[in-house]
Amino acid sequence: MGSDSMDAVVRRRAKDVSGGKTRLSSVATAIRLLKAFSGDETEIGVSALSQRLGIAKSTVHRLAVTLVSEGLLEQNPETERYRLGVGLFGLGALVRQRMNLSTEARPFLFGLREQTNETVLLAIPSQTEIMTIHNLESRQAIRMRSDIGVLQPAYCTAPGRAIMAFQPAEVVDDILDQSLRQRTPKTVTDPARLRKILDQVQRQGYAIDDEESEAGMRCIAAPVRDASGRVVGAVGVAGPVQRLSLKALSAFVGPLSETTEAISVRLGYHPRSGF
Protein backbone atom coordinates (compact mmCIF):
# COMPACT_ATOMS: atom_id res chain seq x y z
CA MET A 1 0.00 0.00 0.00
CA GLY A 2 1.42 3.40 -1.06
CA SER A 3 1.92 6.31 1.29
CA ASP A 4 -0.96 8.23 -0.34
CA SER A 5 -3.44 5.39 0.20
CA MET A 6 -2.16 4.84 3.75
CA ASP A 7 -2.72 8.52 4.52
CA ALA A 8 -6.26 8.25 3.15
CA VAL A 9 -7.01 5.29 5.44
CA VAL A 10 -5.68 7.18 8.46
CA ARG A 11 -7.77 10.25 7.61
CA ARG A 12 -10.88 8.13 7.08
CA ARG A 13 -10.42 6.33 10.40
CA ALA A 14 -9.86 9.63 12.18
CA LYS A 15 -13.02 10.96 10.59
CA ASP A 16 -14.98 7.86 11.70
CA VAL A 17 -13.74 8.23 15.27
CA SER A 18 -14.52 11.93 15.22
CA GLY A 19 -18.02 11.23 13.94
CA GLY A 20 -18.58 8.66 16.69
CA LYS A 21 -17.46 11.14 19.34
CA THR A 22 -19.78 13.76 17.88
CA ARG A 23 -22.74 11.44 18.08
CA LEU A 24 -21.92 10.47 21.66
CA SER A 25 -21.48 14.13 22.55
CA SER A 26 -24.90 14.92 21.10
CA VAL A 27 -26.50 12.17 23.18
CA ALA A 28 -24.81 13.44 26.34
CA THR A 29 -25.92 17.01 25.59
CA ALA A 30 -29.50 15.85 24.99
CA ILE A 31 -29.48 14.13 28.37
CA ARG A 32 -28.13 17.29 30.04
CA LEU A 33 -30.88 19.26 28.32
CA LEU A 34 -33.58 16.99 29.75
CA LYS A 35 -32.04 17.19 33.22
CA ALA A 36 -32.15 21.01 33.10
CA PHE A 37 -35.87 20.93 33.92
CA SER A 38 -37.10 20.73 37.50
CA GLY A 39 -40.21 21.14 39.62
CA ASP A 40 -39.32 24.79 40.13
CA GLU A 41 -38.65 25.39 36.43
CA THR A 42 -40.95 23.32 34.25
CA GLU A 43 -40.60 25.44 31.09
CA ILE A 44 -37.34 26.80 29.68
CA GLY A 45 -36.64 28.75 26.50
CA VAL A 46 -33.86 28.20 23.96
CA SER A 47 -31.77 31.16 25.15
CA ALA A 48 -31.85 30.03 28.78
CA LEU A 49 -30.99 26.47 27.82
CA SER A 50 -28.14 27.73 25.66
CA GLN A 51 -26.64 29.71 28.54
CA ARG A 52 -27.15 26.97 31.08
CA LEU A 53 -25.64 24.22 28.95
CA GLY A 54 -22.93 26.40 27.40
CA ILE A 55 -23.83 25.49 23.83
CA ALA A 56 -25.04 27.42 20.81
CA LYS A 57 -28.73 28.28 20.40
CA SER A 58 -28.75 26.46 17.07
CA THR A 59 -27.57 23.27 18.79
CA VAL A 60 -30.22 23.60 21.50
CA HIS A 61 -32.89 24.13 18.85
CA ARG A 62 -31.75 21.09 16.84
CA LEU A 63 -31.73 18.83 19.89
CA ALA A 64 -35.08 20.18 21.11
CA VAL A 65 -36.74 19.53 17.74
CA THR A 66 -35.47 15.93 17.80
CA LEU A 67 -36.65 15.38 21.38
CA VAL A 68 -40.07 16.85 20.54
CA SER A 69 -40.41 14.46 17.61
CA GLU A 70 -39.80 11.54 20.01
CA GLY A 71 -42.28 12.84 22.60
CA LEU A 72 -39.58 13.51 25.20
CA LEU A 73 -40.11 17.29 25.00
CA GLU A 74 -43.10 19.50 24.24
CA GLN A 75 -43.20 23.12 23.12
CA ASN A 76 -45.68 25.55 24.64
CA PRO A 77 -47.27 27.20 21.56
CA GLU A 78 -47.91 30.42 23.47
CA THR A 79 -44.47 31.01 25.03
CA GLU A 80 -42.44 28.83 22.61
CA ARG A 81 -40.64 27.50 25.66
CA TYR A 82 -39.99 23.80 26.09
CA ARG A 83 -41.19 21.39 28.79
CA LEU A 84 -40.76 17.68 29.44
CA GLY A 85 -42.98 15.49 27.27
CA VAL A 86 -45.37 12.69 28.12
CA GLY A 87 -42.97 10.21 26.51
CA LEU A 88 -40.78 10.52 29.59
CA PHE A 89 -43.77 9.79 31.81
CA GLY A 90 -44.32 6.53 29.96
CA LEU A 91 -40.69 5.51 30.38
CA GLY A 92 -40.75 6.44 34.05
CA ALA A 93 -43.92 4.45 34.57
CA LEU A 94 -42.21 1.36 33.14
CA VAL A 95 -39.29 1.76 35.55
CA ARG A 96 -41.61 2.33 38.49
CA GLN A 97 -43.70 -0.68 37.53
CA ARG A 98 -40.65 -2.91 37.40
CA MET A 99 -39.25 -1.63 40.68
CA ASN A 100 -42.62 -1.97 42.44
CA LEU A 101 -43.00 -5.51 41.13
CA SER A 102 -39.49 -6.42 42.24
CA THR A 103 -39.96 -4.91 45.70
CA GLU A 104 -43.41 -6.35 46.37
CA ALA A 105 -42.55 -9.80 45.04
CA ARG A 106 -39.33 -10.34 46.97
CA PRO A 107 -40.69 -11.71 50.29
CA PHE A 108 -43.14 -14.00 48.50
CA LEU A 109 -40.37 -15.40 46.30
CA PHE A 110 -38.36 -16.37 49.37
CA GLY A 111 -41.45 -18.05 50.80
CA LEU A 112 -41.99 -20.02 47.59
CA ARG A 113 -38.39 -21.22 47.60
CA GLU A 114 -38.82 -22.46 51.17
CA GLN A 115 -41.94 -24.38 50.09
CA THR A 116 -40.47 -25.94 46.95
CA ASN A 117 -36.73 -26.10 47.73
CA GLU A 118 -36.14 -25.31 44.05
CA THR A 119 -34.90 -22.27 42.16
CA VAL A 120 -37.49 -19.48 42.05
CA LEU A 121 -37.31 -16.66 39.53
CA LEU A 122 -39.23 -13.54 38.58
CA ALA A 123 -39.30 -12.39 34.95
CA ILE A 124 -40.76 -9.41 33.13
CA PRO A 125 -41.53 -8.87 29.43
CA SER A 126 -38.93 -7.10 27.32
CA GLN A 127 -40.38 -6.60 23.82
CA THR A 128 -40.40 -10.12 22.30
CA GLU A 129 -38.28 -11.62 25.10
CA ILE A 130 -38.27 -11.84 28.88
CA MET A 131 -35.77 -10.63 31.45
CA THR A 132 -35.11 -12.25 34.83
CA ILE A 133 -35.07 -9.61 37.56
CA HIS A 134 -34.97 -11.96 40.57
CA ASN A 135 -33.28 -15.34 40.86
CA LEU A 136 -33.32 -17.26 44.14
CA GLU A 137 -31.28 -20.39 43.55
CA SER A 138 -32.16 -23.69 45.16
CA ARG A 139 -29.88 -24.73 47.99
CA GLN A 140 -29.56 -28.18 46.48
CA ALA A 141 -26.31 -29.17 44.75
CA ILE A 142 -27.88 -29.67 41.31
CA ARG A 143 -30.04 -26.68 40.50
CA MET A 144 -31.25 -24.33 37.79
CA ARG A 145 -29.34 -21.10 37.25
CA SER A 146 -30.64 -17.96 35.55
CA ASP A 147 -28.54 -14.82 35.55
CA ILE A 148 -30.29 -11.56 36.44
CA GLY A 149 -30.70 -9.15 33.52
CA VAL A 150 -30.17 -11.74 30.80
CA LEU A 151 -32.76 -11.80 28.01
CA GLN A 152 -34.37 -15.12 27.11
CA PRO A 153 -36.90 -16.13 24.46
CA ALA A 154 -40.53 -15.95 25.50
CA TYR A 155 -41.83 -18.72 23.23
CA CYS A 156 -39.93 -21.62 24.84
CA THR A 157 -39.66 -20.62 28.51
CA ALA A 158 -42.35 -21.17 31.12
CA PRO A 159 -42.25 -17.57 32.40
CA GLY A 160 -42.29 -16.31 28.82
CA ARG A 161 -45.34 -18.37 27.95
CA ALA A 162 -47.09 -17.36 31.17
CA ILE A 163 -46.66 -13.75 30.04
CA MET A 164 -47.27 -14.29 26.32
CA ALA A 165 -50.56 -16.09 26.80
CA PHE A 166 -52.15 -12.94 28.21
CA GLN A 167 -50.70 -10.37 25.83
CA PRO A 168 -52.61 -8.67 22.96
CA ALA A 169 -52.80 -10.65 19.74
CA GLU A 170 -50.39 -8.31 17.94
CA VAL A 171 -47.70 -8.91 20.56
CA VAL A 172 -48.05 -12.68 20.19
CA ASP A 173 -47.96 -12.30 16.40
CA ASP A 174 -44.72 -10.28 16.60
CA ILE A 175 -43.07 -13.05 18.60
CA LEU A 176 -44.32 -15.95 16.50
CA ASP A 177 -43.56 -14.19 13.20
CA GLN A 178 -39.86 -14.28 14.05
CA SER A 179 -37.48 -17.10 13.18
CA LEU A 180 -37.88 -19.33 16.25
CA ARG A 181 -34.67 -21.15 17.12
CA GLN A 182 -34.58 -24.82 18.10
CA ARG A 183 -32.78 -24.47 21.43
CA THR A 184 -33.10 -28.14 22.42
CA PRO A 185 -34.50 -31.27 20.72
CA LYS A 186 -37.77 -30.62 22.59
CA THR A 187 -38.21 -26.95 21.64
CA VAL A 188 -41.55 -26.26 19.95
CA THR A 189 -41.06 -23.80 17.09
CA ASP A 190 -44.21 -24.36 15.05
CA PRO A 191 -46.42 -21.24 15.46
CA ALA A 192 -49.65 -23.24 15.26
CA ARG A 193 -48.57 -25.60 18.06
CA LEU A 194 -47.37 -22.68 20.15
CA ARG A 195 -50.73 -20.94 19.81
CA LYS A 196 -52.43 -24.08 21.13
CA ILE A 197 -49.99 -24.17 24.04
CA LEU A 198 -50.74 -20.53 24.83
CA ASP A 199 -54.48 -21.24 24.72
CA GLN A 200 -53.94 -24.00 27.25
CA VAL A 201 -51.89 -21.65 29.46
CA GLN A 202 -54.80 -19.20 29.41
CA ARG A 203 -57.24 -21.91 30.49
CA GLN A 204 -55.15 -23.46 33.26
CA GLY A 205 -53.38 -20.33 34.49
CA TYR A 206 -49.81 -21.62 34.34
CA ALA A 207 -47.17 -22.66 31.80
CA ILE A 208 -44.64 -25.49 31.68
CA ASP A 209 -41.26 -25.71 29.95
CA ASP A 210 -40.25 -29.37 29.58
CA GLU A 211 -36.56 -29.11 28.56
CA GLU A 212 -37.50 -26.70 25.76
CA SER A 213 -35.25 -23.86 26.81
CA GLU A 214 -32.42 -25.78 28.44
CA ALA A 215 -31.78 -29.52 28.19
CA GLY A 216 -32.12 -31.29 31.53
CA MET A 217 -34.23 -28.56 33.14
CA ARG A 218 -37.96 -28.14 33.69
CA CYS A 219 -39.89 -25.08 34.83
CA ILE A 220 -43.43 -24.11 35.76
CA ALA A 221 -44.56 -20.46 35.84
CA ALA A 222 -47.66 -18.38 36.48
CA PRO A 223 -48.47 -14.76 35.60
CA VAL A 224 -48.46 -11.72 37.87
CA ARG A 225 -51.02 -8.94 37.30
CA ASP A 226 -51.05 -5.27 38.20
CA ALA A 227 -53.95 -3.14 39.47
CA SER A 228 -55.48 -2.94 35.98
CA GLY A 229 -55.41 -6.71 35.54
CA ARG A 230 -52.59 -6.55 33.00
CA VAL A 231 -49.96 -9.30 33.15
CA VAL A 232 -46.67 -7.57 34.03
CA GLY A 233 -44.47 -10.53 34.89
CA ALA A 234 -44.29 -14.18 35.83
CA VAL A 235 -42.93 -16.27 38.69
CA GLY A 236 -41.28 -19.58 37.86
CA VAL A 237 -40.08 -22.63 39.79
CA ALA A 238 -37.35 -24.58 38.03
CA GLY A 239 -35.07 -27.56 38.58
CA PRO A 240 -33.38 -30.58 37.01
CA VAL A 241 -35.38 -33.36 35.36
CA GLN A 242 -33.75 -35.93 37.66
CA ARG A 243 -35.64 -34.38 40.56
CA LEU A 244 -38.61 -32.74 38.85
CA SER A 245 -40.83 -35.14 36.97
CA LEU A 246 -43.87 -33.61 35.32
CA LYS A 247 -45.93 -34.99 38.22
CA ALA A 248 -43.61 -33.34 40.74
CA LEU A 249 -43.80 -30.11 38.77
CA SER A 250 -47.60 -30.14 38.81
CA ALA A 251 -47.47 -30.38 42.61
CA PHE A 252 -46.11 -26.81 42.59
CA VAL A 253 -49.26 -25.40 40.95
CA GLY A 254 -50.89 -24.67 44.30
CA PRO A 255 -48.06 -22.80 46.05
CA LEU A 256 -47.07 -21.08 42.79
CA SER A 257 -50.62 -19.81 42.18
CA GLU A 258 -50.89 -18.62 45.79
CA THR A 259 -47.61 -16.74 45.40
CA THR A 260 -48.50 -15.00 42.14
CA GLU A 261 -51.95 -14.09 43.47
CA ALA A 262 -50.43 -12.62 46.64
CA ILE A 263 -47.96 -10.55 44.60
CA SER A 264 -50.73 -9.40 42.27
CA VAL A 265 -52.85 -8.30 45.24
CA ARG A 266 -49.87 -6.30 46.54
CA LEU A 267 -49.80 -4.56 43.16
CA GLY A 268 -53.49 -3.65 43.49
CA TYR A 269 -55.13 -6.51 41.61
CA HIS A 270 -58.47 -7.84 42.90
CA PRO A 271 -58.80 -11.43 41.59
CA ARG A 272 -62.37 -12.03 42.78
CA SER A 273 -63.72 -9.08 40.84
CA GLY A 274 -61.36 -9.71 37.92
CA PHE A 275 -59.99 -6.18 38.19
Image (spheres, rainbow, N blue to C red):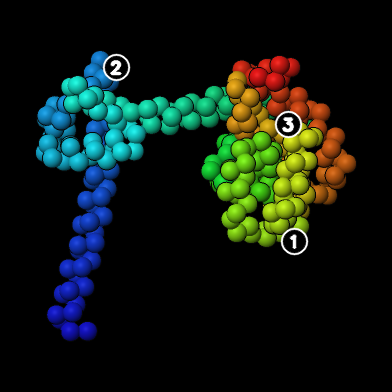
Q: Secondary structure at mark 1?
A: loop
Q: Is tag 1's residue or tag 2's residue first in the polypeptide sequence?
A: 2
The residues tagged by marks 2 and 3 sit, at their Cα atoms, a distance apart of 43 Å
The residues tagged by marks 1 and 2 sit, at their Cα atoms, a distance apart of 56 Å
Residue type of the residue flagged with mark 2? Gly
Q: Which residue is mark 3?
A: 113
Residue 24 percent location from the top left of the image: 27, 48
Residue type of the residue flagged with mark 1? Pro
Q: How many marks?
A: 3
Residue 242 percent location from the top left of the image: 83, 49
Q: Is tag 2's residue or tag 3's residue first in the polypeptide sequence?
A: 2
Q: Is tag 3's residue or tag 1's residue first in the polypeptide sequence?
A: 3
Task: Please say if 39 is above or below 60.
Answer: above
Badge number at residue 39: 2
Q: Residue at x 25, y 50 (%)?
A: 23
Residue type of the residue flagged with mark 3? Arg
- Residue 212 appears in the figure: no
Q: Residue at x 62, y 45 (%)?
A: 172
Of residues 158 and 195, the one nearer the viewer is 195
Query: Which is in the foreground here, disc 3 or disc 1?
Result: 1
Task: Please say if 71 is above or below 267.
Answer: below
Residue 47 percent location from the top left of the image: 11, 29
